[in-house]
Image (cartoon, rainbow, N blue to C red):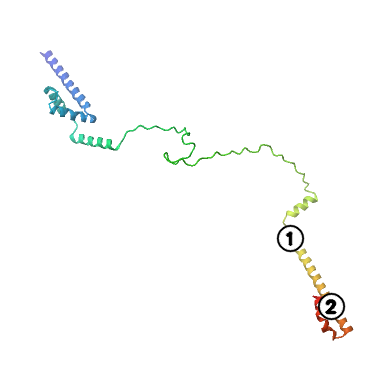
Amino acid sequence: MGIAGGTDSSSGEEDGDAEWKAAIDSVAAVDVSSSYGLSKFHATSNNGGSLGVGHSNHEDEKKTKAPGIKLYQIKAQKLLDGLLDKNIEMVTTHIPDNDNHQSDGGLVKLFRKAPPGMRLDPVDQDPGPQKKPKIIPGEDIDEKSKKFRRNIQSVAVNGSDIVAAARLACQSSLARWEARDTAAKAAAKREEERVAELKRIRGEKWLPSVAREMKSDTG
């Protein structure tokens, strides 16, 4: 009796495990993508399809055991599928090869579908000097020579030298002005002497008649 009871309990546990496995499999089989199949299945069963009464009862039992999809979930999925079908179009595109520049002819484009843009001209590289420049050695400079000292003095700026040169220039200009003044005074004195000599020789009456000629001569 005890052995039989043990065997009955073990067989009952196995049957319960089998039922749980079947329920888990049915739940795993039900997903979002099977909503259309479930709706079609219910439509065919309601319309008197080829499925039998026993098969429909078995599916009803699975439905009661498994937490099936709600009606609002099915409607929401249909709405999402409709929106995706209307707004998204699946097309095949060819991926361009970035390394191939023969199609655009080497032109720079701002956008992919933009018209041909500006062409980059090749830049000529500077080849550089072809020959080595010939450097002629200069003359040796003797810093103690008079020529070198004169060259240095000609380009050097010294305050005392500038003041001395200015003083010499002032003295020379003053001497030239004095010479011109002395020459002008001597010429005026000679003219006075000549007029006085004419007065003595020809008299006072002669002067008005020849004053114009004398003025033109002196001018």
The residue positioned farthest toward the left in the image shown: 1
**Residue at disc 1, secondary structure:** helix
Instruction: Give the mark nearest the N terminus, 2 or 1.
Output: 1
Between residue 189 and residue 4, name the one nearer to us. Answer: 189
Residue 219 located left or right of residue 97? right
Between residue 49 and residue 171, name the one nearer to us. Answer: 49
In contact (CB < 8 Å): disc 2 and disc 1: no
Q: Quadrant of residue 174?
A: bottom right
Report the residue marked by disc 2. Answer: 191
Quarter of the image where the N terminus is located: top left
Q: CA distance from mark 2 to mark 1?
A: 44 Å
Q: Residue at x 88, y 84 (%)?
A: 202
Between residue 146 and residue 25, name the one nearer to us. Answer: 25
**Residue at disc 2, secondary structure:** helix
Q: Residue at x 80, y 72 (%)?
A: 181
Label 2, residues with CA under 10 Å away: few <14, some 14-19, many ≥20: few
Q: Which mark is residue 162?
A: 1
Q: Residue at x 87, y 81 (%)?
A: 198
Is 55 placed above or below 155 here?
A: above
Spot occupied by residue 64 in the image (x, y as percentages of width and height): 14, 28
Identified by mark 1, the residue type is Ile
Label 1, residues with CA under 10 Å away: few <14, some 14-19, many ≥20: few
Spot occupied by residue 129 in the image (x, y as percentages of width and height): 65, 38
